[in-house]
Amino acid sequence: MEPLTKDTCRGNWGTLLLPINPDDTIDFSRLSHEIDVLIAAHVDGIYSNGTAGEFHTQTEAEFDQISQLLAEKCNVAGMPFQIGVSHSVPAIVLDRIRRTQTLKPSAYQVILPDWVAVTNQEARGFLNRISEAAHPVPLVLYNPPHAKRVLPPAGYQELVETTPGLISVKLLDGDEQWYEQMKPLADRIAVFVPGHHLATGVEKGVAAGAYSNVACVHPKAAQQWWQMMQTDINEALQVQNTIQSFFDAYILPYAKKNFSNPALDKLLAAVGAWAPVGTRLRWPYQWIPETDVADVRKGAHQHLPGWFFDAI
Ligand SMILES: N[C@@H](CC=O)C(=O)O
């Protein structure tokens, strides 16, 4: 696919969620079906190996197989796709880029080295070398709140100035002041906020899109909602309120019981039932039992607009 730019990296992106067999292996035939459904939902793009894609549990052989499958399908369908090459060992990140460049991803998603927190200088040095290796494929810096080093707005500004290939950041948004501080950066780079905050991010003039947990519930509904943000932001903000009330009532209680973000995202996908992903996570992580799904689905039907349950 064509490399993305800060202007073309936009919209509602669907994550790969790994279907896991009872013996803890990845079910590649279910994964293949899941990618087909994401393509059929006409999301703006598909990416692998975010937290929801459980990159932190994969072997190198599995990483290669997932990347290959995603690339084959997306290149044929003309669907933009990003490969997540995140790993806490910098040399492995470089190696993953070298092995996947022929797959022609639209961008690479990458975290900063994540065991010993990097200084500003080390972050610059890391991204520069990664960006050189990835060229002409650009980089998306994934900097979630659980990263060892979480950057303030000024930190991103500095990295944008020193890393030519950096076109986008994927992060948790903040309060009014955070949005004010991020505005100048949003002119230079595509800022992606969490899916369930996307209408706020758009309304503030900062967000270019989301790597979306709302797309985990239903990729096509999330796409429709993103389109609504371009034509009727007030209506889109109202839809966001319904999403928020569903999350508060039915998803937050699981977060409070210490289930991880991938566990929550897989629960959302099981509720939407658009692909046979299942709620199971890889060892040693705890997943939410399938037997809980029906109740949460009832809650989703009470809170979310009916078009969240349309067929894809
Ligand atoms: N934060 C997620 C997106 C979906 O919830 C990720 O891992 O990319």
Image: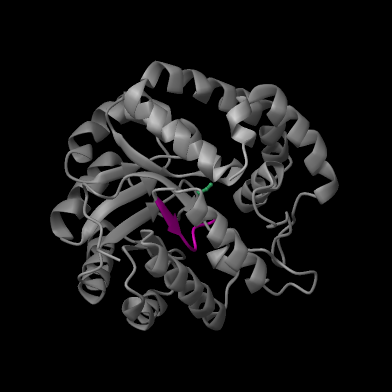
- Residue 185, compared with residue 250, is above or below; it is below
Q: Residue at x 62, y 36 (%)?
A: 310
Near-viewer residue (31 or 20): 31
Q: Would you say the magenta stretch is mainly helix, strand or loop?
A: loop
- Where residue 125 sits, quadrant-wise, is bottom left
- Residue 286, compared with residue 258, is above or below; it is below
Q: Please give left or right for residue 222 compared with residue 152 in the image.
A: right
- Where residue 16 sits, quadrant-wise, is bottom right
Q: Residue at x 15, y 58 (%)?
A: 162
Quadrant where the N terminus lies? bottom left
- Where residue 200 sits, quadrant-wise, is top left
Near-viewer residue (30 or 22): 30
Protein image colouring = one colour
Residue that extends furthest to the right in the rendered view of this protein? 291
- Residue 251, compared with residue 5, is above or below; it is above
Q: Please give left or right for residue 170 compared with residue 183 in the image.
A: right
Asked if residue 48 is among those painted magenta in the image, a careful observer would answer yes
Asked if residue 23 is among those painted magenta in the image, a careful observer would answer no
Q: Identify the magenta region.
A: 45-53
Q: Position of residue 208 (x, y in %)?
A: 31, 39
Near-viewer residue (312 or 66): 312
Q: Please give left or right for residue 140 compared with residue 135 in the image.
A: right
Q: Position of residue 285 (x, y in %)?
A: 71, 60
Q: Can see residue 174?
A: no
Q: Please give left or right for residue 85 compared with residue 38 in the image.
A: left
Q: How many marks?
A: 0
Q: Residue at x 72, y 39 (%)?
A: 254
Q: Residue at x 50, y 38 (%)?
A: 222
Near-viewer residue (293 or 306): 306
Q: Position of residue 103 (x, y in %)?
A: 36, 76
Q: Position of residue 286 (x, y in %)?
A: 74, 56
Quadrant where the C terminus lies? top right
